[in-house]
C-alpha cells in the first residue's frame, strides 16, 4: 500500500506545553489471495452544532455570525462548515440537541459504530429508521467520554437497504466549560462546528460491509 494512501489525523493538547511528537503507527496487512475478509466501508454522518450562550447574550462571540466568522478565520474555511450543515440537514433551531437524517444509498451490513464530539459533548445516538416500527438503535452513548472514542462492534449486525434513513443525534452542554481545564480563561461563546477541541462536532461513524 503506497504511503500516501494512509492517512491519520492527530489532535494535540498543548495545555502542558509543547514537545517532540513521538507518535507511531503500526499496520498489519493480510494476504489478499484466499482471504475471506470483506472490505469495511465508512459512512460519516455529520450533524450541526448550534449551542447558544447560556444567558441568551447575542453580543461578541455570543453572536452566531461572529462565532462562525471566527471559526472560519481560524481554520481557513472559505465557506463555513457550520453553514453547509444547515444545507445538508435542513432547518436548524439553536439548542443543546441537534440531529441530522441521511438516506442510505447502497445496501450493506452495519458491523460497528462510533461517535465523535469534543469536550462539551454529553450524549450521542445513531438510529436506523428512527420513529418507525422498524427502528433500530445502533449507537447509544449516554455519557460521552472524549478520551474513549473507539468504534463499538454490534453484537448482531444490522442490515440496511438503499433508501433506508439513518439519524445521528448529539447533546452538548455549555456548563461543562465551568469545570474543564481546557476552557480556563475563555469567554463563553456561541458554539458551532469547528476543528478545535473547544469548538464542537457531532459526527456518527458507521462501519459496514457491502453485499
Image (spheres, grey):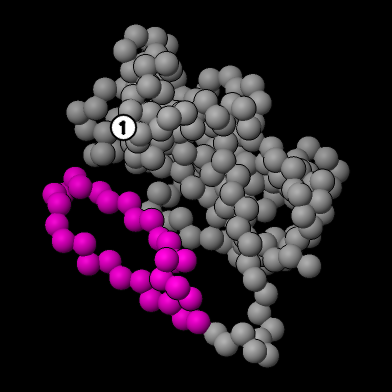
User: Horizontally, is 14 left or right of 191 in the view?
Assistant: left
56 relative to 161, above or below: above
User: Horizontally, is 13 left or right of 64 in the view?
Assistant: left
Residue drawn at 70 percent across, 40 percent down: 102
Q: Magenta part mainly helix, strand or loop? A: loop
Residue tagged 1: 74
Residue drawn at 64 percent across, 71 percent down: 39
- Residue 20 is one of the magenta-drawn residues: yes
- Screen quadrant of the C terminus: bottom right
26 relative to 170, above or below: below
Q: Nearer the viewer, residue 94 or 54?
A: 94
Whole-percent x, y for residue 206 in the image: 62, 55
- Quadrant of res 84: top right
Visible residue check, residue 142: no
Whole-percent x, y for residue 76 in the image: 35, 34
Where does the magenta region start and end?
A: 1-29
Amino acid at each position: 500500500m503506497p504511503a500516501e494512501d494512509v492517512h491519520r489525523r492527530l489532535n494535540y493538547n498543548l495545555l502542558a506545553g509543547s514537545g517532540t511528537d513521538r507518535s507511531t503507527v503500526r499496520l498489519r496487512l493480510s494476504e489478499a489471495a484466499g482471504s475471506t475478509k470483506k472490505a469495511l466501508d465508512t459512512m460519516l454522518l455529520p450533524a450541526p452544532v448550534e449551542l447558544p450562550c447560556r444567558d441568551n447574550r447575542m453580543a461578541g462571540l455570543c453572536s452566531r455570525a461572529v462565532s462562525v466568522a471566527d471559526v472560519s478565520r481560524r481554520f481557513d474555511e472559505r465557506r463555513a462548515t457550520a453553514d453547509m450543515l444547515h444545507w445538508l440537514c435542513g432547518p436548524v433551531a439553536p439548542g443543546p440537541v441537534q440531529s441530522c437524517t441521511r438516506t442510505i444509498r447502497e445496501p450493506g451490513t452495519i458491523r460497528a459504530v462510533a461517535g465523535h464530539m469534543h469536550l462539551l459533548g454529553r450524549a450521542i445516538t445513531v438510529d436506523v429508521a428512527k420513529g418507525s416500527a422498524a427502528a433500530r438503535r445502533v449507537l447509544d452513548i449516554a455519557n460521552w467520554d472524549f478520551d474513549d472514542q473507539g468504534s463499538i462492534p454490534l453484537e448482531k449486525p444490522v442490515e440496511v437497504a438503499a433508501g433506508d434513513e439513518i439519524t445521528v443525534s448529539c447533546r452538548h452542554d455549555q456548563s461543562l466549560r465551568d469545570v474543564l481545564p481546557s476552557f480556563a480563561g475563555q469567554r463563553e461563546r456561541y458554539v458551532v462546528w469547528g476543528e478545535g477541541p473547544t469548538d464542537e462536532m457531532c459526527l456518527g461513524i458507521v462501519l459496514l460491509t457491502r453485499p
